[in-house]
Structure formats: structure tokens, C-alpha cells
Image (spheres, helix red, strand yellow):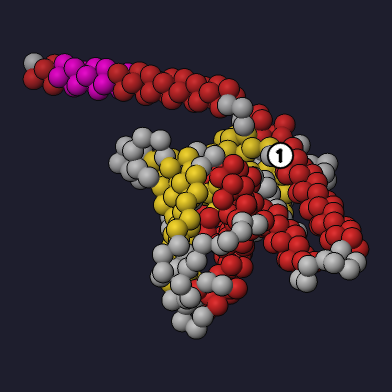
Amino acid sequence: MDADKDLAAENAALRDRLADAIEASARNARKAEDAARRSSLLSAALEMVPVGVVIAEAPSGEIILGNSRVEAMLGHPMLKSEDVDSYGEWISYHADGRRVESREYPLARIIGGGEDEAELDVHYQRGDGSRFWMKIVGRPIRNDGGEMVAGAVALVDIDKERRLQRDQEILIAELDHRVKNAFTVVKSIVSQSLRKDGVMPGLRETIDRRLDAYAKAHAGLVGKTWKTATIASIVRDILGQQIDEGNVHADGPDITVPSKHALALSMAFYELSTNAFKYGALSAVGGSVDISWSLSKGGEPMLSIKWMERGGPPAVSPQSKGFGTFITTRAVAMETGGSVAIDYPAEGLIWTLEAPYAETDAEEHDD
């Protein structure tokens, strides 16, 4: 009897263990099915992304996944690099011609270097030996606990943008060359025209200096976009030496203005500085000029620029108003849509511009 009971108990325990094993197997099958379904969904999602995507496991850096756009873009099969030190098998070059090393790639900098984000523009060599420009943008992938479990990079074809940028730079350089030549021709014509009796002494030199100032203002705007300049850079172009010597003090926030305004301000500052050197504060030992600019807060933004002279001969309103007065008043007011006020207190001339200000795209600016 006891033997029968023991046998029955043993059979029951075996049945329980078998049931547990079957249930565990079912759970594992469901987990595997869920994992396969998630993997399938991830692969499908990656195929919908309009850029190449590569994912690598952390901390090894082994590349485990990539979408079909990678192979289509690069012209060779996906390279399953084993670790971050193997990324050099993806052949690409820097702008200066140096080959990109394994640890320089964004994926290596994220997984091996711990960076939260990394970008790099490379000249990539396709499978057929041709090259194109590609931007690589990388980010870490973290679990719920914040631990990095993988790294991912997006591969973006920027070859067209690079070629357009290069063509634009060539065109701007050619335009700059032609404009400089035009200034030279104009100066030559003026010089030839003024070589006669009865011409006011110094007139030719004055015109030359003004043309040179305009040419310098133009040159300061030549860059990748040729659309904006900062007020600080405009002031330094005209009065950089005096700023370094401490005779001119410039102060104001980082404000960009469009090229049309920049040229007008450059000419106005040139005329004001010329007057200061001849008759104003910069003509006397210890004289100084304070240039300040600011933006009003609230309502429509207004740009305010003030030129204030101190320590020179007493300021006197000119008897006649010539070209310099036209540039510092009517011309700059018309170009900026603002208004100009000039005061002549005994302490020194004060010139003020008030003009409406519109935001400019910071990316367009190039000092």
C-alpha cells in the first residue's frame, strides 16, 4: 500500500513538473513570438525612414542592424563591424583629404566615447570607388533605467547641398572680384576727370577715400551668404585701430543687420570718423568716441545707435552741409527706414539713429 501511495505521489509530482515545463515553454514561445514581432515592426519602421539608419550594440559597438537605404546610398553591402575599432572599414575622408579613423565616427564617439550626440560630414567612398558627401548624425539608445544599450546613426546624403554651396562660393568670389575691379575703374575715371585746373584741392583724395570706404564695406559682407553683418563687425572694420588704442569705445549686444543696412552704416561711420579726426574728438589728445547700440523691448523692436564724442574741440554746427552730412543723415535714414538726430553740445557731437528692426536669420550671418 505504501509503495502504491509513493508511486502515485511521484506521478503527481511528475505531472506538475511537466505542466510547469509546458507552461514555461509556452511563455518562452510567446516571448519569442513577441520579440520576433517587435523586430519585424522595427525593421519595417526603419524601412519607412527616408535616410540610412545603422544600429550598433553597446558596449561592444558591434553593428547589428541597418535599413536598405544604407546599401542603396553607399553602394555596398552592410558592413557588420565587430567593434568600434573596426569602423575604419567604412571608407570616408575629411574635407582636407585625411581618411576618417574608426574612433572619429559618431557611432564610435557615442558608444566608445560616451557622447550624447555626435555629427560628422564625410566624403564617403562608395563600393564603385566614387565619392559623395554624407552627414552622419548619432544618438545613444537607452533602456528604462537610463543605461545605454545601443547607438544609432542616421546617414544623410548632402552631396547636392555641398555642390550648390561650392558653386555659390565660386560665384560670390567672382562677383567680389568684378565689383573690386569696378571700383578701380571708377576711381581711375574720377582721377582722370579731376586732372584739370580749378578743381578744389584735396577733392580727388576725398573721393578716393570714400570709394575705398564703400569698397571695404562691400568686402566685409562677402561670405557664404552675403546677406548680413553684425554691428560690432561694421564698427571694427571702420575704427578697429582706434578701438585697440582705446580712443574709441564700442558696446552693444550681438545684433545682425541686412547687407543694405550694413553698407549704409559703414558709410555713416566712415563719415563720422573722418569728421572726428578732422574737427572733433579724435583730433585732440585725450579725445574719445563712445559708440553704443541697443534694441528696445516691448512692441515693435527699434534699433538705437548712438555716436557720442568727448574731449575734443567744442562741437559746432557746420555752416554748409555737404556729402558727408547727406550720408550721415538722409542716406542712412532712407536705407534703414529710421530717423537721425545730430546735436552739437559743447562737450562734443552726438549722432543718434533710431530705426525699426526686423529679425535676421542667424545662419545667414558670416563675419
List the residue tagged with mark 1.
161
Asked if the magenta segment contains residue 158, the reply would be no
Residue sitting nearer the eye, 124 or 1: 124
Q: Is residue 40 above or below residue 235?
A: above
Q: How many marks?
A: 1
Residue sitting nearer the eye, 50 or 107: 50
Is residue 99 rendered to the left or right of residue 281? right
Q: Is residue 237 above or below residue 264?
A: below
Is residue 150 rendered to the left or right of residue 235? left
Q: Residue at x 61, y 65 (%)?
A: 238
Q: Residue at x 66, y 30 (%)?
A: 69
Query: Disc 1 residue type?
Result: Glu
Name the spot of residue 232 as percent of width and height, x first: 52, 59
Magenta segment, prevailing SS (helix, strand or loop): helix
Magenta highlight range = 7-22
Quarter-of-image position of residue 93? bottom right
